[in-house]
Image (cartoon, rainbow, N blue to C red):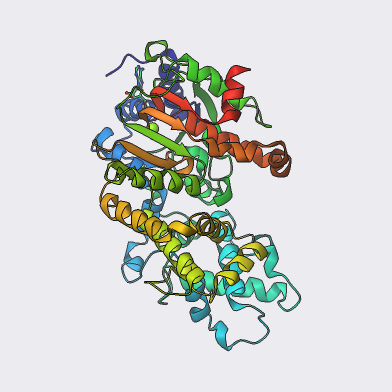
Amino acid sequence: MHVQTEEQIHCVNSALRAANSSKPLVIEAGAGCGKTTTLQSISSALFQTGHANQLYLAYNSALAAAGRDAFPSGVEVRTVHSAAYRALSKALVHRKTGTVYSKHIIDALALDGRSGIPDKFAYARALLTSMERFCASADNNICLDHIAHWLLHDSISKEQAIADTQSLFQLVSPLSKSNIPVSHDAYLKTWHLLGAPGMNEYDSVLVDEAQDSSAVMLACLEHANNLIAVGDSAQQIYAFRGAVDALRNMDGMRCSLSQSFRFGPEVAILANKLLQKKKVKPSLFLKGMAAKGTTLTAAPKGEAVTKIYRTNAELVKDALMLYDYNRSDQVFVIGDLEDLALKVRTAFDLKSGVQSGKKHPSFFQFKSFSEAEVWAEKYADAEIAQIISMTKEFDSRSSDVVGMLESIGARTKAYKKPPSDAKFVLTTAHRCKGLEWANTIIASDFDKLFTPFNQKRLGSKVDDELNLLYVALTRGIQTVDIRSSYLMDIAKA
Ligand SMILES: Nc1ncnc2c1ncn2[C@@H]1O[C@H](COP(=O)(O)OP(=O)(O)O)[C@@H](O)[C@H]1O
Ligand SMILES: [Mg+2]
């Protein structure tokens, strides 16, 4: 066990005082500043005051698995979704859970037989977006605020859109008996609407990486008897999924953790400078650990490295280069590569007109490649647009790209984390949350978002991009090799 820093001791003492006064405690922390370790110390201190029944909530299942090893057996370790699932398990046992696609919605709401809907796939997709917004919110009823604006055109009334979104939610809710899959967000929302049963059975609830909590999660946490939340506002990277800068919005006592144990001062100084570019200025000044001496240089020759990208397209380009050098068997990609491979295969099939295998459900409605292109443009569908641009870029290498993605995907899907012999770990910034590596490389594709044109276009959303770059920058322990000129210019300034 480490000697606790003064900040950590202050957090533990604050947690005990907060528990006595029935107020939540919110701990604002920087990257690698001992969030999970401090929650462990708080958990032990609360045990000693009689809080025998505790729940620790991790952000995703990989972090929950790590938490299970780190917390004593008296602490239940879950994600918010798994807490919801457990409470609704009697109903969910009869239902399939997973992604809901447009085709499910068309069938479940019998849209084929309905007149007055100009494009039923677009309508289904808009209903899904509207329902997802409702599910992420703390609201009890579906109203116009949740409805996707592109659903509201002449032929569909507001009342109709709300009623259809309501019917869709009822069908995907675990409480109904339909065949449509229950989405993870739908059972979480159902749990919220029922008053988050089970949440108040714990003496204390400890929430890790709380910055990306959505409004619905925060509403569920309101049922906790004693709440301790820790997170890093600057690592909020899921605003597009409904995360709400949870830490700033939470009421309660506050304290902070600013000493990073992961990296040295050189990274901390650059991270602070980077966060100063944000429109909403950071509330925390990050301190590096002198003993770590992390350098902003390339990894020593021959050592394993992890490259962190902004986009899948750039990641795939490098994976293809490694494939060309016969190094694919040393590559590990974080995330569901088989799903990406299927999307890319489907798009290439549409382009060539030859169906070589199964079709990805996201492409179900398209009869041609140009239909997919028109759709992506018309509905600003980022998922389809990304696959289309990759298909165009790798057109001459289609079978290599698909084969490579499928084989890396099949080889690595069994692992929860990269195997120790992985020489090249490739990840997007969104996927590297909570992880760390000895040697990292920051890819150059972050730069596209920081051109003067894009900064103006993004407006306040540029803060989300800066958060992503900050997450990428703060993963390295020994070396951080910066290939982004935008970040390098900040380092030199
Ligand atoms: N007081 C301390 N002194 C030295 N190392 C510490 C201290 N507290 C935590 N650490 C170490 O710092 C690293 C990061 O801590 P962790 O709690 O995992 O951070 P986070 O959850 O913020 O990513 C771990 O290796 C942990 O053992
Ligand atoms: Mg942690």
Q: Nearer the viewer, residue 324 or 173?
A: 324
Q: Residue furthest right?
A: 154
Q: Quadrant of the N terminus?
A: top left
Asked if 328 appears above or below 439 in the picture, the reply is: below
Task: State the image coordinates of residue 474 (x, y, percent, origin top left).
Answer: 46, 28
Viewport quadrant of the C terminus: top right
Instruction: Pinpoint residue 264: horizontal percent, then vertical percent.
Output: 43, 16
Locate residue 290: give its quadrant: top left
Q: Residue at x 35, y 39 (%)?
A: 425
Q: Quadrant of residue 432?
A: top left
Q: From the viewer's perspective, tell me whether residue 295 is left or right of residue 40.
A: right
Give x and y (percent) for residue 423: 29, 35
Drawn side of residue 370 relative to residue 420, left or right: right
Q: Which residue is depicted at the point 67% across and 65% down?
A: 378
* Residue at the extreme top of the image, as rendered: 290
Nearest the viewer among 335 and 24 is 335
Q: Is residue 419 left or right of residue 290?
A: left
Q: Position of residue 317 (x, y in %)?
A: 45, 46
| On screen, residue 463 above or below 14 | below
Q: Can residue 275 be seen from the camera position used here? A: yes
Report the image quarter containing ligand 2.
Answer: top left
Q: Quadrant of residue 272?
A: top right
Q: Is residue 150 above or below residue 487?
A: below
| Residue at (73% x, 79% y) in the render | 155
Q: Residue at x 52, y 35 (%)?
A: 235
Residue 231 visible? The answer is no
Q: How many marks?
A: 0
